[in-house]
Image (cartoon, grey):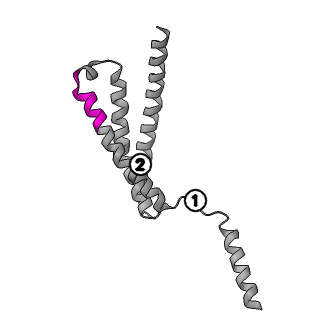
Amino acid sequence: MSDDYDNNNSSSSFTDEYPYLPLLTNKIKFWSYLTTLIPSIICLFFILYHFLFDRTLRNTLNNHVIIIVLIIGLLYDLTIYPWMIYYYHQDGIWERSMNFCFIWTFIDWIYYKQYCLLGQQLNDIFLYFMIV
């Protein structure tokens, strides 16, 4: 009789300690990032190639901002996302130095700020052309 009580009590304490289970495991996050990152990099190279090597697209002034956004996106895809994929592949256990964490945070912050500033400039350009 006491064994039944202990078994019932232990199962309820497990649900008390962990009130929720994650919907997306690290394995699901790993494969979803990996399957979307590879086509993303291929598409970025393809679009960037056409913007840089087609003379009419390269010389058009409003495409310069788009080229910069594509380059920033490519750098983000080649730095931040592979680190995230590695983190999820290791099931969230990854020994990193403090310097690496600072560099990762700094790069992530810089890319985010650049996207915000370029997004604002794109909005200003579109509003300018709509008024004219």
Q: Is residue 5 above or below residue 24?
A: below
**Can you tell which mark lies on residue 104?**
2
Residue lying at 65% horizontally and 63% vertically, measured from the top left: 20
Q: Give the CA separation, mark 1 to mark 2.
A: 26 Å
Q: Which mark is residue 23?
A: 1
Look at label 1 and name its amino acid: Leu
Give the quadrant of residue 49: top left
Q: Mark 2 falls on what kind of element? A: helix
Segment colored magenta: 46-55
Name of the residue lying farthest toward the top = 132
The residue at the point 73 percent across, 81 percent down is 8
User: At label 2, which amino acid type do we have?
Assistant: Trp
Q: Main secondary structure of the magenta part?
A: helix
Q: Nearer the viewer, residue 100 or 79?
A: 79
Q: Position of residue 127 (x, y in %)?
A: 49, 16
Which of the labelled discs sits on residue 118, or is there none? none
Count of numbered badges drawn on the protein:
2
| Foreground of the two, 110 or 121 | 121
